[in-house]
Every structure is written in structure tokens, then in C-alpha cells.
Amino acid sequence: MFTGIITHTGRFIKKTKGFEFKVPAVPAKKITKGTSIAINGVCLTVRNRIGTTIYVDIMPETLEKTILGDLKFDDQVNLELPVTPQSFLSGHLLTGHMDGLAKLETITKAGNSRILGFSIPGSLFKHVVRKGSIAINGVSLTVIEAGKN
């Protein structure tokens, strides 16, 4: 389980047999083989860690439903380690299981904030409700309004 509160960012290195990511030293110390980590919100299992480089395998289904397959060298990714029973839950509980892709359509300035407008596939719309939560690239957001798409 994750909260959608991004604690660190990392960098995509390359795709070989699996995917390689460079992570900051602080979370790297907590990561071992078998650790779950959310990378852009996707719950992945660490296959190996050498220093601050982690190695994960990504299934074709995950590549189809996320942007992870489109990453290029040195692209920044959002990172979050899983919550523990002692964690302060300051976001929303998220599983890290992806249902599909959203497309950013608009960005509107509102005071010191930005209102982001996304379009989503019709099959996902029934799961989005006003004042509900949704995660985009692992960032927990609250839905202000839900229209037809």
C-alpha cells in the first residue's frame, strides 16, 4: 500500500533484461531484493539493488496501462516506498495497481494552485467520483469535478 505522497524522485537508466532506475541514497538503504516500490505510482518488486541502482521487471500488461514503457534515459520518475503500520497516512491509500492511461488536457491557474483537466477512457469513468481520490503517476489527487470523460 502507498499514500500517493511522493517522497523522492529517481531517474530511469535503461531497459535491459528488466528496467534500471537510479534512486537517492536515503531510500536506497531501505531497499532490498523483494521490496515493493511505487515508481510513477506503479507497484513494482525490486529484483536487485546495487548501490543506488535498483532493478525491476515490468510485465507487458503494466507497460500497456502505464507510461513506464515510454521512459527515456534520465527521465525523472516519482518514487514512494510502501507504508508500514507505523506510517503517518497523509495521502490516500493506493494499491499501485494501474487501470489505464489518462491524458492531460488542460492546466488552469487558480490562486496558488493549478487545476488539471484529464480525459480518461470510458471504461474507467464509473470509478471516478467528485471529491474522490485518483492517482496520476503516483501522485494522490482529489477530484474536484467529474464530467462525461
Image: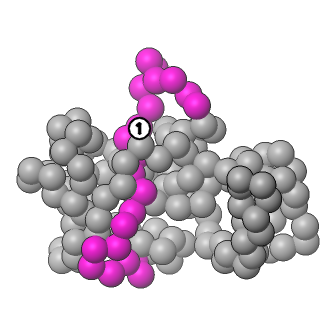
User: Callout 1: helix, strand or loop?
Assistant: loop
Asked if residue 96 can be seen in this view, the reply is yes
Q: How is the rendered protein coloured?
A: one colour
How many discs appear?
1
- The reply, left or right, for residue 127 in relation to residue 80 is right
Whether 70 is among the magenta residues is yes
Q: Quadrant of residue 74?
A: bottom left
Q: Which of 51 and 74 is in front in this view?
A: 74
Q: Mark 1 points at which residue?
A: 82
For image coordinates 73% across by 78% down, the residue present is 105
The residue stretch that appears in magenta: 69-90
Image vertical order of residue 124 relative to residue 47, above or below: below
- The reply, left or right, for residue 142 in relation to residue 99 is right
> What percent of the width, then of the height, locates residue 19?
25, 69
> What percent of the width, then of the height, locates residue 37?
36, 48
Asked if residue 57 can be seen in this view, the reply is no
Q: Quadrant of residue 21?
A: bottom left
Image vertical order of residue 96 relative to residue 60, above or below: above
Q: Residues within 10 Å of mark 1 (few under 14, many from 20)?
A: some
Q: Main secondary structure of the magenta part?
A: loop
